[in-house]
Image (cartoon, rainbow, N blue to C red):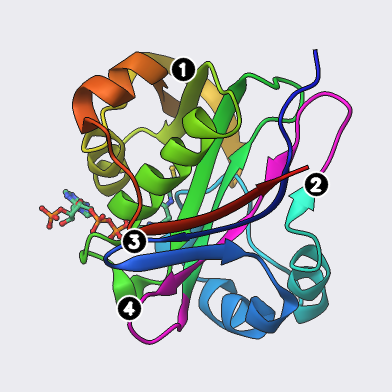
Amino acid sequence: MKRPRLKHAELFGERVKLVPLDPRFADTAFDVLHENEDILRWLVWDGPACREEVADFYCRWIVPSGNGDDYHFAILDVETEAFAGSIGPRFAGHPTTGDVGYWLDPAYWGRGFMTEAVRMVTHLAFRYLDAAVMTAYVFVGNAGSRLVLERNGYRMAHLSKAKVMKGGVAVDEWYFTILRHEFERELGDYKPVREVVELE
Ligand SMILES: CC(C)(COP(=O)(O)OP(=O)(O)OC[C@H]1O[C@@H](n2cnc3c(N)ncnc32)[C@H](O)[C@@H]1OP(=O)(O)O)[C@@H](O)C(=O)NCCC(=O)NCCS
């Protein structure tokens, strides 16, 4: 069966706006991320080695595969349009199981930005991309990320011992999941303030 694929998407919330990643955000992203342990200590990725690495990655917001696509959005402050971080629902290898990953510039922490970004991406996945389940892996101890997910109806399914290696150390992860009916039950008929979604 042919799976839905995004051609273009922009989601507008009360605090943030999600737009496709674009090279024009790459320099800011590098400046925020490079050797920033406040962010990187919570990611499997160790961050970019050079500006070119980010610029190259930000050229493609869709990473297609024959078996599920990965999408990468920039998170913008809806008032100023400034770049604040990134979020992506990823389906590669599991077309009906989406995995959401994200990071935010610490200058914007604690303002509800990621709670809204995760809500919009989860809505996108269930409403348009036919996701059966949305998931997230969170390093144990990342209380902020856990709250973001729980406020959107995600629940911890299990704890994976020694799931990844970070800096030579085995890290445990919480595995969060949410089904479509759980999202609808928790969030009602949630919709972003405005959305522009084009499918192939
Ligand atoms: C985790 C992260 C995404 C949260 O983004 P955010 O926009 O600040 O989140 P929100 O404001 O929507 O909500 C976070 C909530 O958690 C709380 N919180 C944040 N850090 C916390 C901590 N260490 N302990 C307890 N609560 C915490 C915030 O106060 C906020 O609650 P409040 O609204 O009651 O004040 C952001 O801090 C981040 O990018 N961290 C580094 C990268 C990362 O962890 N990525 C996720 C990997 S799974």
Q: Position of residue 46 (x, y in %)?
A: 63, 56
Viewer-nearest of labels 4 and 1? 4
Q: Amino acid at mark 4?
A: Ala
Residue 171 visible to the viewer: no
Drawn side of residue 182 relative to residue 126, left or right: left
Q: Amino acid at mark 3?
A: Gly
Q: Amino acid at mark 2?
A: Val
Drawn side of residue 30 relative to residue 37, left or right: right
Helix, strand or loop at label 2? It is strand
Which residue corresponds to mark 4?
A: 107
Q: Residue furthest right?
A: 66
Q: Which badge, 4 or 1, is on the more N-terminal residue?
A: 4
Check contact, mark 1 vs mark 3: CB within 8 A: no
Magenta span: chief secondary structure: loop
Which residue corresponds to mark 2?
A: 63
Which residue corresponds to mark 3?
A: 13
Would you say the beta carbon of the disc 3 residue lies within 8 angstroms of ligand 1? no
Check contact, mark 2 vs mark 1: CB within 8 A: no
CA gap, disc 3 to disc 4? 19 Å
Q: Amino acid at mark 1?
A: Lys
Residue 63 visible to the viewer: yes
Which residue corresponds to mark 1?
A: 161
CA gap, disc 4 to disc 1? 32 Å
